Image: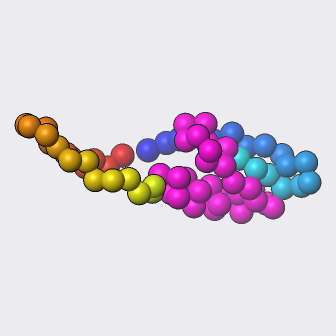
């Protein structure tokens, strides 16, 4: 899966980035390499939100897919 990230120069130095496809998902880093590492962690955290297990009704099915 590929996802677009917007990288900004931080006013106080370093960088910060946001992930438009995931509202509220942003991070920062003093170096570009640190920013990239932090981005992977931030995206993983934003996508790993716990939600209640859906309860199927009638002939509905719950499936899990990897993207």
Using the image as rendered, state which of residue 62 and residue 64 is in the foreground. 62
Give yes or no for residue 44 being in the magenta stretch.
yes
Residue, x 33% and y 53% (percent of image)? 52
Number of numbered discs visible in the structure rendering: 0
Give yes or no for residue 35 being in the magenta stretch.
yes
Quadrant in the picture for residue 30: bottom right
Q: Position of residue 7 (x, y in %)?
A: 73, 43
Residue, x 83% and y 46% (percent of image)? 9
User: In the picture provided, is 9 more to the left or to the right than 48?
Assistant: right
User: In the picture provided, is 52 more to the left or to the right than 58?
Assistant: right
Q: Is residue 32 visible?
A: yes
Q: Position of residue 46 (x, y in %)?
A: 53, 52
Placement of 28 over or under 25, stated as above or below: below
Q: Position of residue 66 (x, y in %)?
A: 32, 49
Q: Is residue 4 visible?
A: no
Q: Residue furthest right?
A: 12
Using the image as rendered, state which of residue 61 and residue 34 is in the foreground. 61
Q: Residue furthest left?
A: 59
Using the image as rendered, state which of residue 58 and residue 32 is in the foreground. 58
Placement of 31 over or under 25, stated as above or below: below
Using the image as rendered, state which of residue 41 and residue 46 is in the foreground. 46
Q: Quadrant of the N terminus?
A: top left
User: In the picture provided, is 14 more to the left or to the right than 7?
Assistant: right
Residue, x 26% and y 48% (percent of image)? 54
Range covered by the magenta-colored residues? 18-47
Residue, x 59% and y 56% (percent of image)? 42
Q: Position of residue 16 (x, y in %)?
A: 76, 50
């Amino acid at each position: 899966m590929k996802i677009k990230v917007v990288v900004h120069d931080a006013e106080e130095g370093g960088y910060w980035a946001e992930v438009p496809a995931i509202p509220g998902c942003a991070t920062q880093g003093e170096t570009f390499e640190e920013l990239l590492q932090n981005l992977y962690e931030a995206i993983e955290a934003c996508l790993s939100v716990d939600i209640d297990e859906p309860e199927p009704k009638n002939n509905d099915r719950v499936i899990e897919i990897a993207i």
